């Protein structure tokens, strides 16, 4: 709760080692309405695809309504929490001395607007961090330390003993906006009690491909949802297996999966791929069908598998389009189970 957080991280605490663990990041939708969040949409010209993907998810969940309860049963509420919208906007807050570890924002570019307080930032490219990490890995665990300890202890050591030179450092005051391109690691520490808003950005084709595939089908990262849409003997055609052993294991495992698990994974694949396919009209440069594992055929496969597993049950699929969407607006199917 906020009261417990306040007592642990603010009341009577000195900025530094007493507060370095206190930074909190929460989904912006949990703290503000869509209308209120519009004031933070500072770069509409970027054409952030996450807005359209988020709109599709919300439309999908709204169209499903009580049918989702019929399809998923007790797991419907948790499924909606995970898949009913796309989290790409966040609020971050914490007392002086707080800050997260050195990290990359899921490989995505982002901007961060400081609403209150001040922060110290350090940015470095993935190439520079790999170069330094090769030398410093045994001596320093600088990627696992808090932001406060990074600036206080690790940064001087990296500079003096491991030749860290290529990085950018700056201070951010209230009202300032930080823009961080993809491929850059970041770490920031609050030098005063701080509140900020940040938004992840997605519009570049190669990054889009990676994001979509990581959410739907990437066996080497143990992401298998799209595979549930296909008969086991057709899964091999999706490719992307880490090795032959994994391919055989997965095909065998899919033959023994219970219907309830198949239904949930298939529905997840539909909403994941649907969000990508819904960009085809508005973002043709992404070439969704060609660059990702999500295609119009994949959509048909997922819907057909869902229909097969729900045959004879009361759940309706009339709200799920038979043809893959080209925009965030859903056009319901004409027939029901």
Image (spheres, helix red, strand yellow):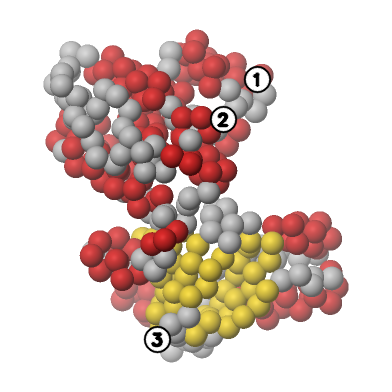
Q: Which mark is residue 154?
A: none
Q: Residue 189 vs residue 152: left or right?
A: left
Q: Earlier in the sequence, mark 3 or mark 1?
A: 3
Q: Which residue is mark 2?
A: 219
Q: Which residue is mark 1?
A: 245
Q: Residue 295 vs residue 28: left or right?
A: right
| Foreground disc of the pair 1, 2 | 2
The answer to whether any part of residue 204 appears in the image is: yes
For residue 320, what is the image quadrant?
Answer: top left
Residue at the location (48% across, 67% down)?
111
Relative image position of residue 90 (x, y in whole percent): 39, 64
What secondary structure is found at the residue carrying circle 1? helix
Q: Nearer the viewer, residue 162 or 14?
A: 162
Q: Nearer the viewer, residue 326 or 196?
A: 326
| Foreground disc of the pair 3, 2 | 2
User: Measured along the vertical axis of the image, is residue 329 above or below residue 45?
Assistant: above
């Amino acid at each position: 709760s906020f009261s417990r957080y306040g007592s642990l991280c603010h009341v009577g605490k000195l900025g530094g080692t007493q507060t370095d663990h206190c930074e909190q990041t929460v989904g912006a939708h949990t703290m503000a309405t869509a209308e209120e969040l519009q004031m933070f949409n500072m770069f509409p010209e970027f054409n952030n695809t996450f807005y359209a993907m988020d709109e599709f998810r919300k439309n999908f969940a709204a169209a499903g309504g009580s049918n989702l309860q019929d399809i998923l049963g007790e797991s419907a509420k948790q499924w909606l929490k995970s898949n009913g919208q796309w989290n790409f906007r966040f609020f971050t807050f914490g007392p002086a001395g707080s800050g997260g570890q050195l990290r990359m924002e899921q490989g995505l570019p982002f901007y961060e607007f400081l609403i209150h307080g001040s922060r110290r930032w350090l940015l470095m490219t993935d190439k520079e961090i790999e170069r330094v990490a090769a030398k410093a890995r045994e001596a320093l665990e600088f990627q696992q330390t808090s932001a406060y300890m990074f600036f206080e202890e690790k940064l001087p050591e990296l500079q003096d003993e491991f030749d860290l030179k290529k990085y950018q450092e700056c201070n951010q005051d209230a009202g300032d906006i930080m823009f961080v391109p993809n491929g850059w690691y970041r770490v920031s520490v609050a030098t005063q009690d701080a509140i900020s808003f940040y938004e992840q950005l997605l519009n570049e084709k190669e990054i889009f491909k990676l994001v979509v595939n990581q959410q739907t089908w990437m066996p080497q990262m143990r992401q298998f949802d799209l595979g549930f849409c296909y008969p086991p003997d057709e899964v091999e055609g999706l490719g992307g297996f880490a090795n032959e052993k994994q391919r055989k294991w997965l095909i065998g495992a899919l033959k023994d999966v219970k219907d309830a698990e198949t239904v949930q994974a298939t529905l997840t694949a539909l909403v994941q791929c649907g969000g990508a396919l819904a960009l085809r009209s508005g973002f043709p440069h992404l070439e969704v069908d060609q660059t990702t594992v999500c295609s119009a055929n994949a959509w048909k496969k997922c819907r057909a598998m869902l229909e097969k597993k729900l045959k004879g049950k009361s759940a309706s699929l009339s709200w799920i389009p038979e043809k893959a969407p080209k925009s965030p607006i859903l056009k319901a199917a004409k027939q029901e189970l």
